[in-house]
């Protein structure tokens, strides 16, 4: 967390609103707001453990995943009945399981729907395997000391496994449906078309795709204004961030309702436009490819590069966001370093147009009172103290505090 504290005097606002943007920012971008826990205001706003002993080896469809085994006939006969769920997930793969667990861990009931037509025996085998997988994931949390065996059973009981014949009934009255089908366009088109025929016209449909643009998916069913992408990071039940991607047709109210639903289960939603790669995948693709290039070039060993990420890059960015770090260290430092690196390593390291614009406008971050965030009227001494305290906490958690004689 190198910075230049000597360059400033008085020091996604800790509690309250941040100051407005100054007029000089008009030619560089509009201002937004940092997260509530952050100080400052953005100066731009562009668009397997073993099972924990729940005692089941098979189960019924449309009933809690923790229920006992049942016959194939019972699986087809049992419906959702009066069991209303807080959310529905279409697609029982890895991401679908993770979303179901996220809701169930937060105390909410969820229907996990297998949209593939299967014979009774195959359906029983599918749900038995699915239940075992859910058991194993909860078992890992039990092993980590996060849940007791009894809590694992309670969480599992909140997840209803639903076969295709009962899927339409499970969707009645649902206001939030996650589509987590395989990443093949024809599968998405068929699944979303089916959803469009069975969900309420006002229900939000949030695809979990990591491949397709939301505008492309929204065109596949009626009511594109309520179609969004909710990109979860794996493991979905543990990672807090969910990226919401909206199209020009998306209603603000739909975005807000999805955001509220995610926050209700402890997730941290962020919003982006209909762009390839969203936010995190786009950033991490650059980092991972550059790490691979360094191995190819013999810059360092695989182990040392990963150690550098865990104990340096990743650790630092867990406290300061990438743009916040530019302001902390100085946009002029990034500008100069990028010019040097682009000359040595290629144009991919050239400073971004926004970095160049800030440099020439004298908006280099904390030292100038504005950069990507606006620090006018902010107690930056307190801000720095908050950030350093958070960093010390991270170091302590990882056993990496400096040795002090």
Image (tube, rainbow, N blue to C red):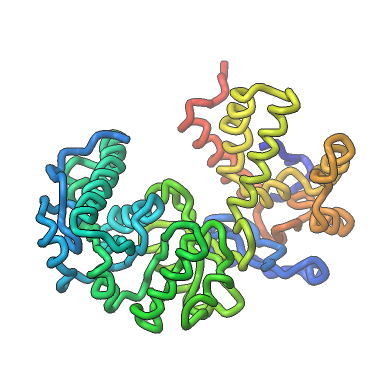
* Left or right: 366 as drawn, with respect to 177: right
Return the residue nearer the eye: 59 or 64: 59
The answer to whether residue 260 is above or below residue 379 is below
* Left or right: 321 as drawn, with respect to 361: left
**Image quadrant in which the C terminus is located:** top right
The answer to whether residue 397 is above or below residue 57 is above
**Image quadrant in which the N terminus is located:** top right
Can you give x and y, in whole percent of width and height, for residue 91 in the image? 36, 60
The answer to whether residue 187 is above or below residue 388 is below
* Left or right: 352 as drawn, with respect to 238: right
Residue drawn at the location 52% of the way across and 59% of the way down = 243
Q: Which residue of the protein is positioned furthest toward the front in this rendering?
A: 119
Residue drawn at the location 34% of the way across and 78% of the way down = 198
Return the residue nearer the eye: 91 or 376: 91
Quadrant of residue 262 in the image? bottom left
Return the residue nearer the eye: 213 or 284: 213
The answer to whether residue 82 is above or below residue 6 is below
For the image shown, how many numbered marks are present on the structure? 0
Can you give x and y, in whole percent of width and height, for residue 10 in the image? 72, 50
Can you give x and y, in whole percent of width and height, for residue 271 in the image? 56, 65
Residue drawn at the location 50% of the way across and 75% of the way down = 220
Return the residue nearer the eye: 355 or 247: 247
Can you give x and y, in whole percent of width and height, for residue 165 in the image? 24, 69
Quadrant of residue 7 in the image? top right
Residue drawn at the location 67% of the way across and 33% of the way down = 292
């Amino acid at each position: 967390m190198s910075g230049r504290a000597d360059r400033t005097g008085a020091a996604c606002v800790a509690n309250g609103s941040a100051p407005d943007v100054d007029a000089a920012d008009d030619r560089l971008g509009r201002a937004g707001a940092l997260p509530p826990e952050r100080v400052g205001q953005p100066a731009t706003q562009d668009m397997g453990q073993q099972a924990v002993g729940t005692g089941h080896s098979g189960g019924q469809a449309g009933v809690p995943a923790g229920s006992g085994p049942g016959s194939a006939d019972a699986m087809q006969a049992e419906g959702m009945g009066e069991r209303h769920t807080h959310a529905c997930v279409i697609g029982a793969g890895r991401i679908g399981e993770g979303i179901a667990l996220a809701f169930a861990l937060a105390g909410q009931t969820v229907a996990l729907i297998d949209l593939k037509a299967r014979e009774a025996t195959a359906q029983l085998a599918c749900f038995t395997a699915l239940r075992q997988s859910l058991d194993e994931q909860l078992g890992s949390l039990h092993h980590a000391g996060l849940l007791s065996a009894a809590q694992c059973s309670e969480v599992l009981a909140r997840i209803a496994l639903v076969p295709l014949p009962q899927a339409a009934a499970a969707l009645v009255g649902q206001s939030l449906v996650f589509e987590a089908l395989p990443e093949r366009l024809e599968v998405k088109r068929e699944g979303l078309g089916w959803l469009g025929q069975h969900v309420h016209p006002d229900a939000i449909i949030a695809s979990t795709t990591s491949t397709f643009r939301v505008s492309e998916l929204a065109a596949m069913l009626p009511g594109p204004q309520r179609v969004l992408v909710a990109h979860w990071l794996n493991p979905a039940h543990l990672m807090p961030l969910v990226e919401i991607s909206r199209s020009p047709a998306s209603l603000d109210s739909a975005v807000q309702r999805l955001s509220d639903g995610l926050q209700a289960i402890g997730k941290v939603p962020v919003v982006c436009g209909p762009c390839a790669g969203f936010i995190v995948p786009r950033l991490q693709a650059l980092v991972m490819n550059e790490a691979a290039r360094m191995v190819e070039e013999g810059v360092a060993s695989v182990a040392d590069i990963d150690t550098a990420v865990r104990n340096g890059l990743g650790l630092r960015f867990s406290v300061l966001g990438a743009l916040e770090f530019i302001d902390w260290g100085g946009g002029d430092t990034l500008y100069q370093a990028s010019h040097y690196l682009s000359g040595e390593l290629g144009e991919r390291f050239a400073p971004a147009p926004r970095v160049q614009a800030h440099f020439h406008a004298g908006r280099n971050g904390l030292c100038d009172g504005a950069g990507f965030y606006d620090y006018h009227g902010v107690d930056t001494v307190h801000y720095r103290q908050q950030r350093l305290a958070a960093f010390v906490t991270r170091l302590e958690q990882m056993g990496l505090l400096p040795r002090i004689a």
